[in-house]
Image (cartoon, helix red, strand yellow):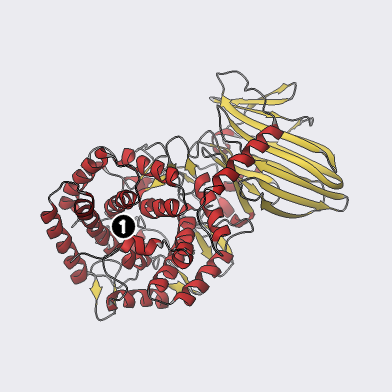
Amino acid sequence: MRIEDYALVGDCHSAALVGRDGSIDWLCWPRFDSPACFAALLGEPSHGRWKIAPHGKYATRRKYQEDSLILETEFETADGAALLIDFMPMRAEHCQLVRMVRGLRGRVAMELEFILRFDYGASVPWITRLDDGIRAIAGPDLAVLRTPVALEPKDLTHVARFEVAAGETVPFVLTHGASHRGVPEALDAGRALAETQKFWREWCVRCSVTGEYAPMVRRSLMTLKALTYGPTGGLVAAPTTSLPEFLGGVRNWDYRYCWLRDATLTLLALMNGGYYDEAAAWRNWLVRAIAGSPAQTQIMYGIGGERRLPEQVLPWLPGYEGSAPVRIGNAAASQIQLDVYGEVMDALHQGRKRGIPKDDAAWALQRALLRHLETCWQDPDEGLWEVRGPKRHFTYSKIMCWVAFDRSIKAVEEFGRDGPVEHWREMRAHIHDDVCRRAWRPELGYFAQSYGSDELDASLLLLPTTGFLPCSDPRVRGTIEAIQRDLTVDGLVLRYRTRRTLDGLPPGEGVFLACSFWLADALCLLGRREEAKALFERLCRLANDVGLLAEEYDPASGRQLGNFPQAFSHIALVTTAMNLSQSAKPAEQRAEKRAA
């Protein structure tokens, strides 16, 4: 199926992707970054899936229950209609995935196919029968599927046929545990459904966003909540790996980790949405993750703050629509990206401004990071987009180095922190002069992607939101207009023009959805509000039928691309919606008034 044909269910530990056809084709247990036990998304059904759908022809429509992450897929057949309800209860001791088939009209013949494969489709488990289902074991993993439906073995899978009449409900509960422990206790599916409804609806009540965009903002915030690892507060970029940025290509990366580049906009999205507890948990994860030697600061970490994320290829998986290789781990974790220093400083500054309880250890860590940044800000790096080509002096990286010193100066001026503020002011002025002198191309009328380059880069749409220069500066306006004119496809924004000489990979990818939202933000700051609103509403229409966005979009084929759902896209949606409709505008919150 197309990437946008999937929906998400999750329990703030892990998540599953459910297709329109009732097939769960992706699930990693017990954590987001654990090996998948259903991996058909990146291969064949034989790599693991769990499908429940009517026998024969049917039509389908789906939605989330209001203010919840409980998915309802309605199947219509010639004989009647049935509802498939999918959800993951908030976790206690074990991971649980619940599916309930409820008869709506007539009598519907249903089919089930259950193919469990641990370790990304590589391990066929040993299956034994229980009184109320089956048990599967492979190495450290155990899974139990409980249901009143009789399951029959067939060619290393399990299948079933059953009927559901109007008013009847047939439950299926899949539970994961450690194989060295006993069989987990049974779960009451009806009670779990009621408790899950209660959790999400109480969570949604806390949302403070109002106005015409409130429903889509609330759905995006729910998606961000679902992508948060509850025990630590870390937010994964996406629950998937290796969904391609170009169909059939090699730009396939593992996004089941936490990127520092998302820090400030995540924090503002959560706080402006009314979710201060989640914002504080994210800030605390951030401080714990980067704690240690400043020279060893990474651009991303595991959901618990893990630093080692070795990249490897899974050769037995052919990839989504043949997009190989399938990768797990991410070698970009070892890259140097100087923008993360500014991102960390800005996130901590925004949290401080909005009353997140201070962490005294965080300030000591900030000062240490600044001392290190002084020694390396003039070095080339791999930049925001994690290019795998030669290092460069990326303009956005240098601007974020300026942000690092600017926000630290504000911590002294506004919050009474101690530090060598005069020296930091000198550093801030020096970096500002360096960028304006070496990145500005007066003959072209825009700031270039890197020093000495003619290339455009969508990251520079964020320039006015950082406070580095205001939108009233003609250099900023020229950069925004150049990107809108020369770095778009059908009005939507590319990250940059992909070339092997730049990023070390074959050219070709979709438009980057977050960048397109950034263009709407920039237009808003330029006073072109109606144009910004039209672009925003067009981007919202690219979301699938249940409001989810991937990382990229292909205007030619009209398909979503990249890992899904993508936190960065949903953060950008929330940010732009607030810039257009709320009194608290993230673009203005970040920019402030630039000090001389």
Residue lying furthest bottom: 443
Q: Quadrant of the C terminus?
A: bottom left
x, y percentage for residue 500? 37, 62
> Above or below — where is 556 with respect to 34?
below
Quadrant of the image occupied by residue 316: top right
Residue 556 image position (x, y, % from top left): 56, 70
The local crowd at label 1, few if under 14, some if 14 to 19, many if 20 or more residues have their Cα within 10 Å, is: many
- Against 369, residue 155 (above or below) is above
Q: Which one is in front, 535 or 561?
A: 535
Q: Is residue 501 visible?
A: no
Please tell me which residue is depicted at 71% across the width and 34% down the height of the picture.
190
The quadrant where residue 496 appears = bottom left
Left or right, 402 with reference to 178:
left
Observer-nearest residue: 356 or 495?
356
- Which image quarter: residue 25? top right
Residue 455 visible, this angle: yes
Q: Nearer the viewer, residue 29 or 427?
A: 427
Q: Quadrant of the N terminus?
A: bottom right
Q: Relative to residue 520, is residue 154 drawn left or right?
A: right
Counting every numbered tag in the picture gives: 1
| Residue designated by label 1 | 383
Secondary structure found at label 1? loop
Side of 94 where 401 appears, left or right: left
Taking the image as shown, residue 92 lies to the left or right of residue 459, namely: right
Across and down, in percent, residue 150 comes to 79, 30
Q: Position of residue 445 (x, y in %)?
A: 29, 79
* Observer-nearest of 572 and 557: 572
Name the amino acid, label 1.
Answer: Gly
For the point 21% across and 67% down, the residue is 435
Q: Vertically, is 365 above or below 251?
A: above
